[in-house]
Image (cartoon, helix red, strand yellow):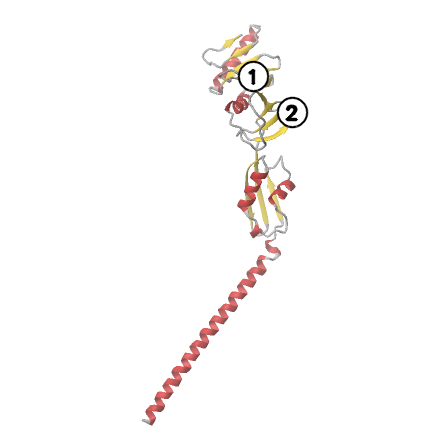
Amino acid sequence: MANGDKNYQKILAARKRRNIKRKFLLVLWIFLFFCFFLLMIWGFNYFYNSSYFKVKNIKVTGNEKYSENEIYSVAKLFQGLNVFEVDKKKIEDTLLTELIWIKSVTLKKIFPDKIELDVIERKPYVKAFYASDYYIIDDEGIVLEKIDAKDLKNYDNIITVKNALKYRPSTGEKIAKKNLLSCGLIYKILDLELKQDVKEAYISKDFEEDIVFLMINNKKIIFGTSDRIQEKNAILREVLDRLKTQEITYSEIDISNVDNPVIR
């Protein structure tokens, strides 16, 4: 029995040592893993805050109306900013909200240290007149800015439209006036020679609200609506050539009805 007890005690002791060893190894592995985890965090934090990811180059393309510094200021972009901290959507939304002339913008992060902003700006389409002011409007009806008469020369390439606005719009507001934008579309499509003789356009005050072009010689071209523009343009060119050839005087040409143009 004594020998059996001794063997049993040895077995228990060996089993206990193995358990202690396993626990020690487990604790050691946990400790080593924890140290490795802390080292990884420290390394990532060190690398994250190092100069490697600090923005060193910011490039803006497509901008004409706004300078790069204006865009940087609104977007709060500056060299030295951590590239990971650049909030792409927030910056894009801010630029679209704050800078009216920007139609769309895309921010690209080029790792490790570059930012690119691709900007598409709105283009002046018509000059809308109300009271004594002129409003520059793009092809989506967005009011870009209000200008004085002295600044009109900066926008000679777009048509002036009168009697389209019924109130003073705000910058950034969208004008829901189809005929206003139609004036810009028609003017854009007109023959170059004819376009040079156009003084301005206006919307008639009658029920039809026809689009009328006033020429520099004070003659009128009643265009009507913006339907069948290409046909109306062709008919207008034909009528003008015939009037010139036959030396016929007139005060207005009405092509609102394509099938029945009228010369007065």
Left or right: where 131 falls relative to 18: right
- Secondary structure of residue under mark 2: helix
- The residue closer to the viewer here, 94 or 110, is 94
- Secondary structure of residue under mark 1: strand
Which quadrant is home to the N terminus?
bottom left
Q: Residue furthest left?
A: 1
- The residue closer to the viewer here, 248 or 160, is 160
Residue 258, given in percent of the width and then of the height, sits at: 46, 14
At label 1, which amino acid type do we have? Phe
CA gap, disc 2 and disc 1: 18 Å
Residue 82, given in percent of the width and then of the height, sits at: 59, 52
Q: Residue furthest right?
A: 150
Left or right: where 20 falls relative to 123: left
Residue 58, given in percent of the width and then of the height, sits at: 61, 46
Q: Would you name the residue on which mark 2 appears?
A: 152
In which image quadrant can residue 71 be found?
top right
In which image quadrant can residue 22 be found?
bottom left
Q: Residue furthest front?
A: 167
In which image quadrant can residue 119 be found?
top right
Q: Taking 257 as reference, is 121 above or below it?
A: below
The disc at residue 63 is none
Disc 1 crowd rating (10 Å Cα; few below 14, some 14-19, many 20+) is many
Say which residue appears at 46% left-offset and 77% top-offset: 24
Q: Would you name the residue on which mark 1 appears?
A: 213
- The residue closer to the viewer here, 248 or 150, is 150
